[in-house]
Image (spheres, rainbow, N blue to C red):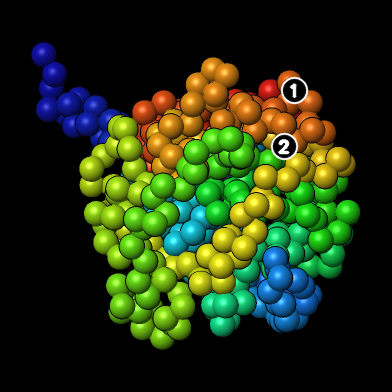
Amino acid sequence: MHTPRLLSRCLFVAFLLSFVSGAVLPARSPAARPECHDFDWTLHISASNDFGFAVPAATYNISATYCPPLKAVANRSQTVQLLIHGATGNKLYWSALASPDEQGYQTYNYSWTEFARLEGYHTLAIDRLGCGNSSHPDPALVRTTPEVEIVAQLLEILHSKSPRQASHSFLPSFSSVILTGFSFGSLVIDVLLNKPPSPSSIPLINATILTGYSHIPNSHPNPNVTISTQQFLPGSQVFPVRFKSLDPGYKTIATATNYAHSFFAGAYDPIVPNVIWSSEDVQASGEVNSLAAGASSFNISSVATYRAPTAIVAGEFDEPLCGGNCGSGDTDLLAMSKRYYPGVEEEEYFSLRVPNTGHMLHYHESARGTMEAVHDWLARMGF
């Protein structure tokens, strides 16, 4: 039986032990998450001829977000994915519609940026000319050719072949750049591959990922069956608060219903099209005119010096690119697109026709699996 004196001593010792234990072994705080950096590039674009349209020389600001990896992977420490969004989008497309430092819309399911960073890659997402926080010149001047030159200049900068601007000291130099596009962004990359502004651009591309994209043989029925049904209106009319100051030549899709009809098919959360449409951006009239004027030129093979590993990925029900059916077997349009990259080895060409998925493949139920498949391919290619 404990005496009162003995019991008080035991309690005092227990108190001391708990105090000392708390002092010696404090709770460990989680490691700080590396932050991303929002910044602008000031780029001078040369005068050019875009399918018969004279584009004047100009200086533009291109908005970008750089994110360091969230996991250290030795052979990826100097590898960056340069992310180029599609029409009526902006750089937030790649990070679940929010800044990568914030919680996006179902980040785990839909954020390419988050997935890539967790795989050990650096990412750099840009707002294309006329989109997001980049310059908005006369919309007639936003054409494919100057957008290709912008990407070419960024390749030079990322490989440190051009001097960095002093305020970009946080941006490391890279030994490998993976060009990654979606839809119109993939088209810009593809034009770069077959009409580079300089031969020096091609060796700076270490791998290419074209998503929401395919080449269409001349014998295939016109795939762009939804282009005529897409209802475009001035952004200032559809979203007057966000785009009230924009020229009416900057347009966006008029309704969430039309957006869903054009870009979604198969398995997807029915809420998602409205979520994306509510945050969509604009497309300049010059891009549309450039696309129409150069349509017959886009199925040109890449230059012979382009030999980097290449992936083409699209949903099997992609309407804008495949007319709702990307084929299978001998009629698989993505596999057939290999002919347009003659310098790429067969074993380094990867085509993925994503089942039960439409054009906006990064926001279907298959999105996570698509990210896994593409990054598995990158790993097999040594990146």
Figure check: 195 above or below 143: above
Taking the spot 75% from the left edge, 48% from the top edge, the residue there is: 193
Front residue of this view, candidates 245 and 372: 245
Residue 236 in percent (x, y) is at: 35, 79
User: Residue 163 occupies which quadrant of the picture?
Assistant: bottom right
Front residue of this view, candidates 104 and 24: 104
Question: Circles 1 and 2: CB distance less than 8 Å?
Answer: no
Q: Amino acid at mark 1?
A: Glu
Q: Secondary structure at mark 2?
A: helix
Figure check: 193 above or below 250: above
Taking the spot 56% from the left edge, 67% from the top edge, the residue there is: 289
Residue 207 in percent (x, y) is at: 72, 39
User: Residue 130 occupies which quadrant of the picture?
Assistant: bottom right
Which residue ends up furthest to the top in the rendered image? 1
Q: Residues within 10 Å of mark 1 (few under 14, many from 20)?
A: few
Figure check: 175 above or below 293: above
The residue identified by callout 1 is 346
Q: Cα distance, mark 1 to mark 2?
A: 12 Å
Query: Where, quadrant-wise, is the C terminus in this rendering?
Result: top right
Query: Where, quadrant-wise, is the N terminus in this rendering?
Result: top left
Q: Is residue 142 visible?
A: yes
Q: Amino acid at mark 2?
A: Tyr
Q: Secondary structure at mark 1?
A: helix
The residue identified by callout 2 is 340
Taking the spot 54% from the left edge, 24% from the top edge, the residue there is: 331
Q: Residues within 10 Å of mark 2 (few under 14, many from 20)?
A: some
Q: Is residue 361 visible?
A: no
Residue 151 in percent (x, y) is at: 70, 59
Mark 1 or 2 closer to N-term?
Answer: 2
